[in-house]
Image (tube, rainbow, N blue to C red):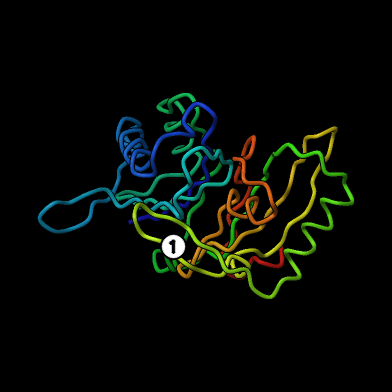
Amino acid sequence: MQRLRLRFGRGEEVKFISHLDVVRFWERALRRAGIPLAYSQGFRPHPRIAVAAPLAVGVTSEAELMDIWLSQWMPPQSLIMKVKGQLSRGFEIFEAYEIGLNVPSLQSSLAAAEYRVELKSEKRGQEMRYSLSCLLQAEKLPWQHFRGDKVHCYDLRALVNDLWIINHHNSLYVLGMRLRCDAGGSGRPEQVLAALGFPQYPESSHRTKLILKGELGT
């Protein structure tokens, strides 16, 4: 058996499909490409595929990670070449590499995610930097998130690792965000913007990196 880790992207064309549909898409694409997927045991075997972290609907990415298990060994580059021909518009595969069968799961290894977020604001650069600094200096930031009829209360500040300005031209800002993304909680760019005083949905949100434990200093 072989275990490969893939990095793939989700573009504008498919940013509104659900996480479950993304997983189903990859199952079909890998099968069509003739990849020898390994299957789970039990009454209803299914392909052994594990995506690192769900990507919110409406967000694009160049950094999604997925582990797949193969029943037969194959060179990672061969897999990339075969799979590329089966991808729908909006999906890309950037790299594949072999990892140990006993390496901890992606879900248990995640630590943070980085985003590039575009928003419109009439604030001057100095004012925006001050807003980011104030949020980062806060010890706590009580927050509420509605899920249907239920209210989820938590400390939003604990989910924000870093914020910075990437670019600013006229009224368009491009912000960088490094947000916590682990079993204990995940930060969402639109909630951080709301905490900064921007209740409107961002012009765009793009995940640029998933950071595993031990990589936070990189």
Disc 1 is placed on an element classified as helix
Q: Residue at x 27, y 50 (%)?
A: 38
Of residue 87 and residue 111, the one placed in the foreground of this image is: 111
- Coordinates of residue 205 in the picture (x, y in percent): 61, 41
- Coordinates of residue 43 in the picture (x, y in percent): 10, 55
Q: Is residue 176 left or right of residue 105?
A: right
- Coordinates of residue 75 in the picture (x, y in percent): 46, 44
The answer to whether residue 164 is above or below residue 174 is: below
- Coordinates of residue 146 in the picture (x, y in percent): 43, 55
Look at the image and tell me in which quarter the C terminus lies. bottom right
Q: Quadrant of residue 30?
A: top left
**Are there few (<14), some (14-19), or many (20+) residues within 10 Å of tag 1?**
some
Look at the image and tell me in which quarter the N terminus lies. bottom left
Total number of numbered discs in the rendering: 1
Of residue 206 and residue 170, the one placed in the foreground of this image is: 170
Q: Is residue 7 left or right of residue 150?
A: right
Amino acid carrying mark 1 in the image: Gln
Q: Furthest-left residue in view?
A: 43
Q: Residue at x 73, y 47 (%)?
A: 175
Circle 1 is placed at which residue position?
107
Of residue 190 and residue 88, the one placed in the foreground of this image is: 190
Q: Is residue 45 left or right of residue 139?
A: left
Q: Residue at x 36, y 59 (%)?
A: 150
Of residue 133 and residue 101, the one placed in the foreground of this image is: 133
Q: Residue at x 65, y 56 (%)?
A: 195
Q: Quadrant of residue 3?
A: bottom left
